[in-house]
Image: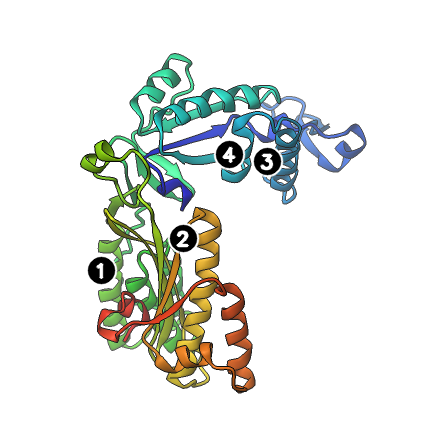
């Protein structure tokens, strides 16, 4: 989310990150492995080796790497890039965005110098800023790929657009429950932007569980037809490209006022009898854009619609806290089209335990934010709840 916030985006990675973290000699015996004395002769004598550095692929390796980097940043916190790297580090990748060109270039130099002190080289720099790309090219650390992988998604710096990694779902003559789970699970959508389509796959799988179909038994023709139509929609929607930056400030406003336009987060929650969810939008004078969405399938055990609307409000409260912490935007407004839920959130009267527990959580997470009524026809997430 932070990567999409500001005008200039930048990504980089630590070269051979794990190999820069050494293992104490007393710990090396647990990393022993066998190898041929002559790799060209499979019948040659085996010998035993030990890793001297953290090995890639071990369960504990990401933790050890992260702890090592955080310790280095703590020891060098006077460097301006230390706090940015600490905030935007994901294993060995660093994703950041900046509003000002000078801040971006300062970060590039400070970050490289900071990590060089730990004998770690920041390479594969990619940015939509031409000046930074020129500097990175001269220093031999530029990422020359036209498409940059960003935590499971794709970013095209030239056009500053993002896209999904496309895994085409084939049309099958015979479909099983295992096939539906396999192909629907390939859709990686961390921001929930494809929720109006992916929620249909969740609902279909839930129905298959209710009907107690076995994993590898061919499904009835009507179910197969339903899946093939859904697969076609999933193939279409994963071809979608969208702007990396949430809202691009108009050039006219930039010339009038160099200060950043004030932004507000608007959280919409909604439910149907099939599913419920929430969506967070960022809004300012230049427009609005969906930041993140999340939905969940309604439980198999029937619940009333007001209860499901309350569950949606819980999702919205958790979501807005996460977004607010990440983007550091203090102005937040919450919206619901359920007057019953709004009454539960404002009343001082005793409520049933199920309702009371969730009202307490919502009030705790959104105590500083107002809740308003939004007519159903104007609710932004009707599609996420599969009406």
Q: Position of residue 4 (x, y in %)?
A: 35, 42
Q: As displayed, is residue 1 above or below residue 144? A: below
* Residue lying at 46% horizontally and 25% vertically, measured from the top left: 107
Q: Position of residue 302 (x, y in %)?
A: 43, 86
- For the residue carrying disc 2, how many other residues have a C-alpha within 10 Å: few (<14), some (14-19), or many (20+)? few
Instruction: Report, in whole angstroms, how far the alpha carbon at label 4 lies from the one at label 1.
Output: 41 Å
Residue 32 visible to an observer of this rendering: yes
Task: Report the residue marked by disc 1.
Answer: 232
* Residue lying at 54% horizontally and 67% vertically, measured from the top left: 364
- Of the two numbered discs 1 and 2 on the same chain, state the one appearing first in sequence: 2
Instruction: Report, in whole angstroms, how far the alpha carbon at label 2 lies from the one at label 3.
Output: 25 Å
Foreground label between 2 and 4: 4
Instruction: Report, in whole angstroms, how far the alpha carbon at label 3 lies from the one at label 4.
Output: 25 Å
- Proximity of marks 1 and 3: CB atoms separated by less than 8 Å: no
Query: What quarter of the picture does the C terminus occupy?
Result: bottom left
- Of the two numbered discs 1 and 3 on the same chain, state the one appearing first in sequence: 3
Foreground label between 2 and 3: 2
Task: Report the residue marked by disc 2.
Answer: 190
Foreground label between 1 and 2: 2
Quadrant housing residue 36: top right
Task: Report the residue marked by disc 3.
Answer: 56
- For the residue carrying disc 4, how many other residues have a C-alpha within 10 Å: few (<14), some (14-19), or many (20+)? some
């Amino acid at each position: 989310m932070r990567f999409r916030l500001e005008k200039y985006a930048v990504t980089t990675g630590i070269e051979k990150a794990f190999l820069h973290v050494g293992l104490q000699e007393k710990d090396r015996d647990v990393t022993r492995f066998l190898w041929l004395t002559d790799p060209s002769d499979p019948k040659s004598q085996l010998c035993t080796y030990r890793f001297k550095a953290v090995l890639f692929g071990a369960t504990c390796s990401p933790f050890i790497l992260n702890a090592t980097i955080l310790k280095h940043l703590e020891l060098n916190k006077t460097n301006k890039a230390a706090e940015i790297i600490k905030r935007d580090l994901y294993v060995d990748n660093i994703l950041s965005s900046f509003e000002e060109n000078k801040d971006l270039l300062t970060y590039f130099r400070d970050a490289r110098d900071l990590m060089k002190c730990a004998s770690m080289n920041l390479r594969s720099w990619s940015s939509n800023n031409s000046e930074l790309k020129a500097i990175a090219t001269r220093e031999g650390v530029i990422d020359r790929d036209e498409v940059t992988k960003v935590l499971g998604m794709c970013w095209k710096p030239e056009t500053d657009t993002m896209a999904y990694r496309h895994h085409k779902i084939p049309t099958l003559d015979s479909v099983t429950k295992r096939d539906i789970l396999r192909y629907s699970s390939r859709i990686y959508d961390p921001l929930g932007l494809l929720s109006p389509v992916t929620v249909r796959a969740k609902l279909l799988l839930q129905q298959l569980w209710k009907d107690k179909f076995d994993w590898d038994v061919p499904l009835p023709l009507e179910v197969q037809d339903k899946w093939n139509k859904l697969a076609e929609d999933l193939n279409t929607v994963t071809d979608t490209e969208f702007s990396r930056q949430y809202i691009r400030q108009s050039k006219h406003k930039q010339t009038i006022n160099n200060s950043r336009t004030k932004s507000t987060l608007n959280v919409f929650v909604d439910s149907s009898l099939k599913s419920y969810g929430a969506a967070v939008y960022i809004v300012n004078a230049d427009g609005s854009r969906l930041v993140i969405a999340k939905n969940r399938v309604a439980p198999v055990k029937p619940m009333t619609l007001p209860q499901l609307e309350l569950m949606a409000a819980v999702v919205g409260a958790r979501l807005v806290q996460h977004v607010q912490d990440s983007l550091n935007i203090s102005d937040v407004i919450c919206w619901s089209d359920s007057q019953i839920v709004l009454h539960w959130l404002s009343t001082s009267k005793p409520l049933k335990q199920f309702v009371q527990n969730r009202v307490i959580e919502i009030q705790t997470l959104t105590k500083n934010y107002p809740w308003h009524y939004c007519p159903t026809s104007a609710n932004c997430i009707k599609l996420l709840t599969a009406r």
